[in-house]
Image (cartoon, helix red, strand yellow):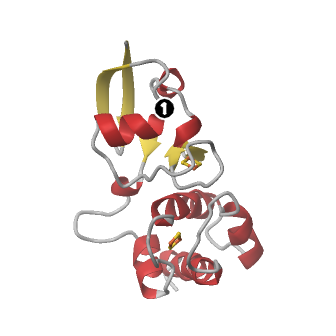
């Protein structure tokens, strides 16, 4: 076991974990933050996407030592109390959620994009979410949701 200190959604935790545990398992099983989903467990589906120091990563590929002293943002960190983040609101409104399994990872990839580029093109949205697989929506509603959220966040 190794002691691991990391900050998740603004709260700093120190936990003892096996060094071969992955960040997705630490978030879900150790910290109880089950909003982040785990599916392929090999970096292919994007369901486990979180932000690490602001950049999107597949948390199933991040080993515990690599998360040391990092700042992690998960889907649980987006809402402001009862108020959904504009991306969450927009996914609900625009049909970007069907079964919802891909949604946390999709939204974290979209957030990373909008943090850097508040007015992305459709192509830039498609590129940003290209590592996130969705079995349900055909992607158009997801792209529409991100574009609508961007507009909302620009005050439009
Ligand atoms: S569970 Fe991590 S990419 Fe699929
Ligand atoms: S909404 Fe079902 S996998 Fe995307």
* Among the 4 quarters of the image, the one containing residue 26: top left
Q: Measured from the top left, where is residue 130 in percent x and y? A: 70, 62
Q: Which is nearer the eye, 150 or 102?
A: 102
- Which residue: 27% across, 43% down? 32
- Label 1 residue near ligand 1, CB within 8 Å: no
> Can residue 50 be seen?
yes
- Which residue: 65% across, 63% down? 129
In the picture as drawn, the residue positioned furthest to the right comes out as: 123
Q: For the residue carrying disc 1, how many other residues have a C-alpha within 10 Å: few (<14), some (14-19), or many (20+)?
A: many
Judged left or right of residue 89, residue 63 is: right
Q: Measured from the top left, where is residue 59 in percent x and y? A: 52, 41
Figure check: 10 above or below 104: above
Figure check: 23 above or below 65: below
Q: How many marks?
A: 1
User: Quadrant of the image for the N terminus?
Assistant: top left
- Which residue: 73% across, 76% down? 121
Q: Which is nearer the eye, 120 or 29?
A: 29
Figure check: 49 above or below 82: above
* Among the 4 quarters of the image, the one containing residue 81: bottom left
Q: Measured from the top left, where is residue 86 in percent x and y? A: 43, 74
> Can residue 11 be seen?
no
Figure check: 62 above or below 82: above
- Which residue: 52% across, 86% down? 156
- Mark 1 lies on residue: 22
Q: Which is nearer the eye, 47 or 90?
A: 47
Q: Measured from the top left, where is residue 64 in percent x and y? A: 47, 25
Judged left or right of residue 99, residue 76 is: left
In the picture as drawn, the residue positioned furthest to the top comes out as: 1
- SS type, badge 1: loop
* Among the 4 quarters of the image, the one containing residue 80: bottom left
């Amino acid at each position: 076991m190794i002691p691991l200190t990391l900050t998740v959604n603004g709260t700093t935790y120190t936990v003892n974990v096996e060094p071969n545990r992955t960040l997705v398992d630490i978030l879900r099983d150790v910290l109880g933050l089950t909003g982040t989903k785990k599916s392929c467990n090999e970096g292919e589906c994007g369901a486990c996407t979180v932000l690490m120091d602001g950049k999107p990563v597949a948390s199933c590929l991040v080993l515990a030592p690599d998360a040391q002293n990092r700042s992690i943002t998960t889907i649980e960190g987006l809402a402001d109390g009862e108020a959904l983040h504009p991306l969450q609101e927009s996914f609900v409104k625009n049909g970007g959620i069907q079964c919802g399994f891909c949604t946390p990872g999709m939204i974290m990839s979209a957030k990373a994009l909008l943090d850097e580029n508040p007015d992305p093109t459709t192509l830039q949205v498609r590129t940003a979410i290209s590592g996130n697989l969705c079995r349900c929506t055909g992607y158009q509603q997801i792209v529409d949701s991100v574009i609508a959220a961007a507009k909302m966040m620009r005050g439009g």
